[in-house]
Image: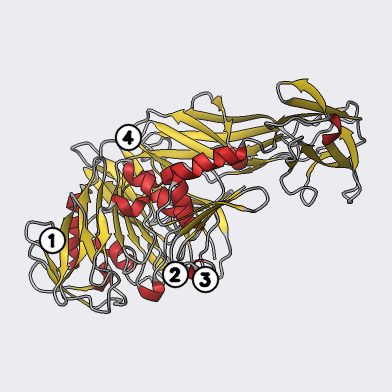
Amino acid sequence: MQVIGIGSGIGNDHLKSWQYDYGVTHALLSDEDENISSQFGTTVSVILDHTMTVQYISSGEFDDAAYRSMLTALAEPLVKIDHMSLSNTEDDQNPHEFDIAIRSSGSFSPGNRLLYWNTDGSDNYTSVALQDTGNNQYTVSLSNQMKGTTVYYYVYAESDNGFYRTHPFNAPGEVHMFDILEDLSPPIIDHTPIGRWRDDRDNLLITAMIRDELDLDYVRLYYRTGGGTPEFVAMSSSEGGYWTASLPLGLATGESMAYRIEVADSSENGNIALHPSSGYHTLAVIEPFPALVIDLDGNANSGPIIYNTLTEIGIQAEYVTTIPDHLELYQSLWISLGIGDNYRRLSFDEQFKLYETLLDHSNVYLEGGNAWVNTHKFQLHSAFQIGGGSTPAAGENDAGPISGMEGAITEGLIFDYTGDNEGMDRLRAKTGATVIFNNAAPEYINAVSYIGDTYKTIGSGFEFGGLADGTGNSTRATLMQNYADFFGVSTETTCTELGTSLWMPARSFAPGDPVSVKAYLCNPDAVSYENVPLFVILDVFGEYYFWPSFTTFDYETVQLESGLTEVIVLPEFAWPANTGTVNGIVWYSAMTDPDIQNLFGTMSSWEFGWSE
């Protein structure tokens, strides 16, 4: 059976949104290029039965209740097979047992419930009848096979009502297979280390993708705090080969945790893999980081200005050109999607990731000249309480001048607009939202703010980088300060524990990205300390380079004033091209006593990498 959703420009991302909104689990077919929908002139939904005969058709709005009712009626007589493919094994002594569930409103004769198998992958299969063990459960046993053998197989069942099914669905074009082998290789662990976590989030979810030729014996996450004895928790499997574990941290700012992943397979050889291959990953507990700039704009002419303006008004920010994991580390997200030909539409998966972050007590600024009308309205867009305007819904090349609205966070600000100006959207503020910017001529809304139950948003139809500083308070710095105040993002960095912390604008860099390194020295005492040795060390896969000379040993002595002191380790530069792809490079920073015998406060680390 197939459910087909046909509509003007409907694509896979839109259908994913349907699945999320309505809990739809049946198949959906998209028509992104409008090859079919152009023949109908409207949205059309169709249900085909197992013979591809149309059983239900409707036009207009998606009607999930009708779909479910029709699907239930059509599905009752069909044959349904439930079977988990056998895994690879080293056992060449015992038979291979197959457990299969088969259901239908009809019944099955022994000759119509079969397992087809061979060991050469050809089109010639041997059939074996499945044995009925009751309650729709069936089993069959194959003789033991020698090591080096691959068994190919599929299941076939035909009911007396004329319906049949294979498993896999399109067998014998696609079949199950498993190997009888000798496994001498350890599992493969794919994990992106987590270098920091918020001090106000108690639970840390650690995820890894793990692959092996055999089933796994165990997957463990070892962890320790403060140099104590390692403990471990078992990681749980999920879809797609991913394994997860949640750790209750309960650590304060400046404290750290070390962790590693250990995996053993079920082989006779007892293969074990570690991540990292030696030692532990180090995770620093930090205050929520103030801001992350996500620049997806095709010509990147606004994101860097957002980043520079945030840092200009004293807000620490990071800058990335892809959507990273662990967005919950940040108090605020600043997203630039671009305008016109440079506009970058978010996929369903991307917007849903941002949507979940937004609902989790976050703040999001989102700009784009085509982000509000000429795009599918996923959950993220609806959270902004912004609708497309009328006359026309998709705009012209006519943004600017732009005026702040009385009583809004932009009151009294007026800007000329010199940025990208193509097909600018007209916006509409839905219930509870506030218009914050209005276009002068022609007059239309082009920015809206909203305060939700657990989050705040600012949605803009123009680019922040296109605003030209005017007179008085009409400057980008003033506007950014107003935005930051609305989000509750502070320019003040607290200093409560003696020690160091490191900062870079991102964790991963691409050619052209801004790069710099800073160390922040915290002295919560009322007195200052003289001649404090400061070490900043670059660890390149076990080769250590000591700042400032980046030789085998070096440091600087600093005057440690009360409060927070910023030290420039590397001034800003653009990341070069043709540097390949590298991950796992780590900075360390620490202060010591004058004799360089003991640490003076807490130390810090920052893991990063780069790609082409």
Question: Whole-percent x and y of residue 227?
Answer: 48, 28
- Residue under circle 4? 200
Label 3 to label 2: alpha-carbon separation: 7 Å
| Residue type (three-letter) at the residue carrying disc 3 | Ala
Q: Nearer the viewer, mark 4 or mark 1?
A: 1
User: Is 552 drawn above or below residue 86 in the view shown?
Assistant: below
x, y (%) of residue 266? 75, 30
- Dot 1 surroundings within 10 Å: few (below 14), some, or many (20 or more)? many
Q: Nearer the viewer, residue 42 or 283?
A: 42
Residue on which the image places disc 1: 410
Residue 136 vs residue 560, the one in the foreground: 136
Q: Secondary structure at mark 2?
A: loop
Which dot, 1 or 3, sits closer to the camera? 1
Mark 1 or mark 2: which comes first in sequence?
Answer: 1
Q: Which coloring applies here?
A: secondary structure
In this rendering, is residue 270 above or below 164?
above
Q: Residue at x 41, y 29 (%)?
A: 249
Q: Are marks 3 and 2 in contact (CB under 8 Å)?
A: yes
Instruction: Find disc 3 in the rendering and name its residue.
Output: 577
Query: For mark 2, what is the residue?
Result: 512
Name the front one of labels 4 and 3.
4
Distance, label 4 to label 1, CA atoms, is 31 Å
In three-dimensional space, the C-alpha distance between marks 1 and 2, rounded to whole angstroms, equals 33 Å
Three-letter amino acid code at the position of disc 1: Thr
